[in-house]
Amino acid sequence: MTPAAPRTPVCDRRIPVTSLVVSSVGLAVASYWTLMSPYAQLLGAFPYRRRTTERVVALTFDDGPNDPDTSLLADLLADEGVRATFFAVGACIERHPDTARRLVHDGHVLGSHGYSHQFRRCAGQAVLRAEVARTEDVFTHHLGVRPVLFRPPWLLRTPGLFDVAEERSLQLVSGEFAHVLEVFQPSPERIARRAVAKARPGSILIFHDGFDAKGGDRTNTVLAVGLVIAELRRTGFGFTTVDRLLGIDPYRPPVT
Protein backbone atom coordinates (compact mmCIF):
# COMPACT_ATOMS: atom_id res chain seq x y z
CA MET A 1 0.00 0.00 0.00
CA THR A 2 1.31 3.38 -0.94
CA PRO A 3 1.62 5.64 2.10
CA ALA A 4 -0.68 8.67 2.08
CA ALA A 5 0.94 11.90 1.10
CA PRO A 6 1.47 14.28 4.02
CA ARG A 7 -1.22 16.90 4.34
CA THR A 8 -0.29 20.47 3.64
CA PRO A 9 -0.83 22.42 6.84
CA VAL A 10 -3.68 24.88 6.65
CA CYS A 11 -2.93 28.36 8.00
CA ASP A 12 -4.82 29.15 11.17
CA ARG A 13 -6.68 32.32 10.28
CA ARG A 14 -8.19 32.81 13.72
CA ILE A 15 -7.36 36.17 15.29
CA PRO A 16 -6.02 35.84 18.81
CA VAL A 17 -8.44 37.02 21.48
CA THR A 18 -5.86 39.45 22.81
CA SER A 19 -5.68 41.16 19.42
CA LEU A 20 -9.44 41.58 19.34
CA VAL A 21 -9.42 43.07 22.83
CA VAL A 22 -6.61 45.48 21.97
CA SER A 23 -8.38 46.52 18.77
CA SER A 24 -11.69 47.05 20.58
CA VAL A 25 -10.07 49.11 23.29
CA GLY A 26 -8.22 51.17 20.70
CA LEU A 27 -11.44 51.81 18.78
CA ALA A 28 -13.27 52.81 21.97
CA VAL A 29 -10.51 55.24 22.95
CA ALA A 30 -10.41 56.76 19.46
CA SER A 31 -14.19 57.12 19.40
CA TYR A 32 -14.28 58.77 22.81
CA TRP A 33 -11.49 61.17 21.88
CA THR A 34 -13.21 62.18 18.65
CA LEU A 35 -16.77 62.45 19.95
CA MET A 36 -16.56 63.35 23.65
CA SER A 37 -13.10 64.55 24.66
CA PRO A 38 -13.03 68.19 25.80
CA TYR A 39 -9.98 68.76 23.62
CA ALA A 40 -10.56 67.03 20.26
CA GLN A 41 -11.03 69.28 17.23
CA LEU A 42 -11.21 66.57 14.57
CA LEU A 43 -14.82 67.22 13.53
CA GLY A 44 -14.69 70.99 13.82
CA ALA A 45 -13.82 73.92 16.06
CA PHE A 46 -14.78 73.23 19.67
CA PRO A 47 -12.96 75.78 21.85
CA TYR A 48 -11.96 74.66 25.34
CA ARG A 49 -9.60 77.59 25.98
CA ARG A 50 -8.59 80.80 24.31
CA ARG A 51 -4.92 81.49 23.83
CA THR A 52 -4.22 84.74 25.63
CA THR A 53 -1.63 86.25 27.90
CA GLU A 54 -4.34 87.84 30.05
CA ARG A 55 -4.72 85.99 33.34
CA VAL A 56 -8.46 85.39 33.18
CA VAL A 57 -10.57 82.24 33.39
CA ALA A 58 -14.22 81.62 32.61
CA LEU A 59 -16.20 79.69 35.23
CA THR A 60 -19.03 77.73 33.59
CA PHE A 61 -21.86 75.63 35.04
CA ASP A 62 -23.86 72.89 33.31
CA ASP A 63 -27.17 71.07 33.84
CA GLY A 64 -29.13 73.76 35.72
CA PRO A 65 -30.87 75.81 36.86
CA ASN A 66 -31.19 73.58 39.92
CA ASP A 67 -32.32 75.08 43.19
CA PRO A 68 -31.26 75.63 45.86
CA ASP A 69 -27.73 75.14 44.50
CA THR A 70 -27.95 77.52 41.52
CA SER A 71 -29.30 80.27 43.75
CA LEU A 72 -26.57 79.60 46.31
CA LEU A 73 -24.01 79.91 43.54
CA ALA A 74 -25.63 83.16 42.43
CA ASP A 75 -25.37 84.47 46.00
CA LEU A 76 -21.70 83.48 46.20
CA LEU A 77 -20.84 84.99 42.82
CA ALA A 78 -22.65 88.21 43.72
CA ASP A 79 -20.70 88.48 46.97
CA GLU A 80 -17.43 87.91 45.11
CA GLY A 81 -18.28 90.20 42.19
CA VAL A 82 -17.74 87.38 39.68
CA ARG A 83 -19.77 86.83 36.52
CA ALA A 84 -20.02 83.32 35.12
CA THR A 85 -21.57 81.42 32.21
CA PHE A 86 -24.40 78.96 32.83
CA PHE A 87 -25.17 76.39 30.15
CA ALA A 88 -28.80 75.84 31.01
CA VAL A 89 -31.11 72.95 30.14
CA GLY A 90 -34.41 74.08 28.63
CA ALA A 91 -36.52 71.83 30.84
CA CYS A 92 -34.72 73.19 33.92
CA ILE A 93 -35.38 76.79 32.91
CA GLU A 94 -39.07 75.88 32.71
CA ARG A 95 -38.79 74.37 36.19
CA HIS A 96 -36.93 77.37 37.68
CA PRO A 97 -37.70 80.40 35.48
CA ASP A 98 -37.18 82.93 38.27
CA THR A 99 -33.70 81.59 38.95
CA ALA A 100 -32.81 81.82 35.25
CA ARG A 101 -34.05 85.41 35.14
CA ARG A 102 -32.06 86.23 38.27
CA LEU A 103 -28.87 84.95 36.64
CA VAL A 104 -29.37 87.22 33.64
CA HIS A 105 -30.28 90.14 35.89
CA ASP A 106 -27.08 89.61 37.90
CA GLY A 107 -24.97 89.87 34.75
CA HIS A 108 -24.26 86.20 34.16
CA VAL A 109 -24.52 84.74 30.66
CA LEU A 110 -26.82 81.86 29.82
CA GLY A 111 -25.96 79.46 27.01
CA SER A 112 -27.94 76.50 25.73
CA HIS A 113 -27.31 72.95 26.96
CA GLY A 114 -30.20 71.42 25.03
CA TYR A 115 -33.74 70.89 26.19
CA SER A 116 -33.87 67.43 27.77
CA HIS A 117 -30.24 66.33 28.37
CA GLN A 118 -31.05 62.88 27.01
CA PHE A 119 -28.33 61.00 25.15
CA ARG A 120 -30.69 59.62 22.52
CA ARG A 121 -31.69 63.17 21.64
CA CYS A 122 -28.11 64.32 21.07
CA ALA A 123 -26.82 61.85 18.49
CA GLY A 124 -29.21 62.20 15.54
CA GLN A 125 -29.22 65.41 13.55
CA ALA A 126 -33.02 65.73 13.28
CA VAL A 127 -33.72 65.26 17.00
CA LEU A 128 -30.78 67.50 17.91
CA ARG A 129 -32.18 70.22 15.68
CA ALA A 130 -35.53 69.88 17.48
CA GLU A 131 -33.78 70.03 20.89
CA VAL A 132 -31.95 73.21 19.96
CA ALA A 133 -35.06 74.87 18.54
CA ARG A 134 -37.16 73.97 21.57
CA THR A 135 -34.53 75.39 23.92
CA GLU A 136 -34.46 78.61 21.91
CA ASP A 137 -38.24 78.85 22.36
CA VAL A 138 -37.80 78.44 26.14
CA PHE A 139 -35.18 81.20 26.21
CA THR A 140 -37.42 83.46 24.16
CA HIS A 141 -40.46 82.85 26.37
CA HIS A 142 -38.77 83.23 29.75
CA LEU A 143 -35.78 85.50 29.02
CA GLY A 144 -36.68 87.39 25.86
CA VAL A 145 -33.50 86.38 24.00
CA ARG A 146 -32.08 83.52 21.96
CA PRO A 147 -28.75 81.99 23.03
CA VAL A 148 -25.68 82.03 20.82
CA LEU A 149 -23.51 79.78 23.02
CA PHE A 150 -24.20 76.05 22.88
CA ARG A 151 -22.52 73.27 24.82
CA PRO A 152 -23.82 69.81 23.87
CA PRO A 153 -24.63 67.48 26.79
CA TRP A 154 -21.64 65.28 27.68
CA LEU A 155 -19.70 67.36 25.12
CA LEU A 156 -20.99 64.89 22.54
CA ARG A 157 -20.46 66.07 19.00
CA THR A 158 -21.20 64.42 15.72
CA PRO A 159 -20.89 65.77 12.17
CA GLY A 160 -24.60 66.63 12.42
CA LEU A 161 -23.95 68.88 15.42
CA PHE A 162 -21.77 71.18 13.38
CA ASP A 163 -24.40 71.36 10.64
CA VAL A 164 -27.08 72.33 13.17
CA ALA A 165 -24.76 74.89 14.79
CA GLU A 166 -24.16 76.53 11.42
CA GLU A 167 -27.87 76.54 10.58
CA ARG A 168 -28.80 78.14 13.92
CA SER A 169 -25.78 80.49 14.11
CA LEU A 170 -24.56 78.88 17.33
CA GLN A 171 -21.09 79.09 18.84
CA LEU A 172 -20.08 75.65 20.13
CA VAL A 173 -18.22 75.69 23.43
CA SER A 174 -16.19 73.00 25.17
CA GLY A 175 -14.11 73.50 28.31
CA GLU A 176 -12.05 71.57 30.83
CA PHE A 177 -13.76 69.66 33.63
CA ALA A 178 -12.85 71.24 36.96
CA HIS A 179 -12.67 67.73 38.40
CA VAL A 180 -13.47 64.62 36.40
CA LEU A 181 -15.49 63.22 39.32
CA GLU A 182 -17.16 66.48 40.33
CA VAL A 183 -20.61 65.16 39.39
CA PHE A 184 -20.16 62.57 42.16
CA GLN A 185 -19.36 65.31 44.68
CA PRO A 186 -15.93 64.60 46.17
CA SER A 187 -14.87 67.00 48.89
CA PRO A 188 -14.84 70.74 48.07
CA GLU A 189 -11.09 70.78 48.69
CA ARG A 190 -10.46 68.03 46.12
CA ILE A 191 -12.62 69.72 43.51
CA ALA A 192 -10.94 73.07 44.13
CA ARG A 193 -7.37 71.72 44.04
CA ARG A 194 -7.94 70.07 40.68
CA ALA A 195 -9.70 73.11 39.22
CA VAL A 196 -6.93 75.47 40.30
CA ALA A 197 -4.28 73.12 38.88
CA LYS A 198 -6.01 73.21 35.48
CA ALA A 199 -6.42 76.98 35.33
CA ARG A 200 -4.42 78.72 32.62
CA PRO A 201 -4.84 82.14 31.01
CA GLY A 202 -7.98 81.80 28.88
CA SER A 203 -9.23 78.58 30.50
CA ILE A 204 -12.90 77.61 30.38
CA LEU A 205 -13.58 75.53 33.52
CA ILE A 206 -16.65 73.26 33.68
CA PHE A 207 -18.58 72.77 36.92
CA HIS A 208 -22.13 71.44 37.39
CA ASP A 209 -24.96 73.17 39.23
CA GLY A 210 -27.31 70.28 38.43
CA PHE A 211 -27.16 66.66 37.35
CA ASP A 212 -28.50 65.31 34.07
CA ALA A 213 -31.43 67.79 34.19
CA LYS A 214 -32.82 65.95 37.23
CA GLY A 215 -31.64 68.16 40.08
CA GLY A 216 -29.09 66.72 42.48
CA ASP A 217 -27.18 67.97 45.51
CA ARG A 218 -24.32 70.27 44.43
CA THR A 219 -23.36 71.56 47.88
CA ASN A 220 -19.70 70.59 47.49
CA THR A 221 -19.50 72.32 44.13
CA VAL A 222 -20.80 75.56 45.62
CA LEU A 223 -18.22 75.37 48.41
CA ALA A 224 -15.46 74.46 45.95
CA VAL A 225 -16.20 77.46 43.75
CA GLY A 226 -15.64 79.76 46.70
CA LEU A 227 -12.23 78.14 47.29
CA VAL A 228 -11.36 78.34 43.59
CA ILE A 229 -12.19 82.05 43.37
CA ALA A 230 -10.11 82.83 46.45
CA GLU A 231 -7.06 80.84 45.30
CA LEU A 232 -7.10 82.05 41.70
CA ARG A 233 -7.40 85.64 42.83
CA ARG A 234 -4.47 85.10 45.19
CA THR A 235 -2.36 84.02 42.20
CA GLY A 236 -3.38 86.98 40.07
CA PHE A 237 -6.30 85.64 38.04
CA GLY A 238 -9.48 87.47 37.18
CA PHE A 239 -12.77 86.13 35.84
CA THR A 240 -14.77 86.61 32.68
CA THR A 241 -17.65 85.08 30.74
CA VAL A 242 -17.30 82.83 27.70
CA ASP A 243 -18.75 85.37 25.27
CA ARG A 244 -16.23 88.00 26.36
CA LEU A 245 -13.42 85.46 26.25
CA LEU A 246 -14.31 84.50 22.67
CA GLY A 247 -15.22 88.04 21.62
CA ILE A 248 -18.81 87.37 20.51
CA ASP A 249 -22.32 88.48 21.44
CA PRO A 250 -24.05 86.00 23.79
CA TYR A 251 -27.60 86.50 22.51
CA ARG A 252 -29.68 87.24 19.45
CA PRO A 253 -33.07 88.94 19.37
CA PRO A 254 -36.05 86.59 19.57
CA VAL A 255 -37.82 85.64 16.36
CA THR A 256 -41.01 87.66 15.95
Image (tube, rainbow, N blue to C red):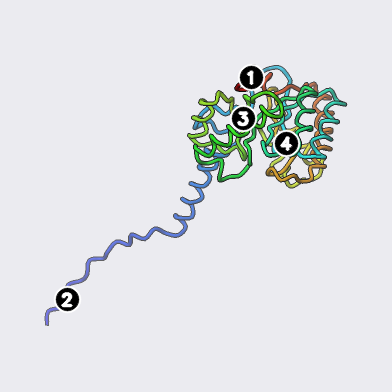
Going by the numbered disc 4, the residue's amino acid type is Phe
Q: Residue at x 27, y 64 (%)?
A: 10
Query: Quick one: SS at disc 3?
Result: strand
Disc nearest the viewer among 2 and 3: 3
Going by the numbered disc 2, the residue's amino acid type is Ala
Q: Position of residue 243 (x, y in %)?
A: 67, 21
Disc on the earlier residue, 3 or 1: 3
Disc on the earlier residue, 2 or 3: 2
Q: Is residue 251 above or below residue 94?
A: above
Return the residue at label 1: 253
| Callout 4 crowding tier (Cα within 10 Å): few <14, some 14–19, many ≥20 | many
69 or 256, which is in the foreground? 256
Q: Which mark is residue 4?
A: 2
Disc nearest the viewer among 3 and 4: 3
Going by the numbered disc 3, the residue's amino acid type is Phe
Distance from label 3 to label 1 (Cα)? 16 Å
Return the residue at label 4: 207
Distance from label 1 to label 4 (Cα)? 28 Å
Query: Is there CB contact under 8 Å for labels 3 and 4?
Result: no
Return the residue at label 3: 150
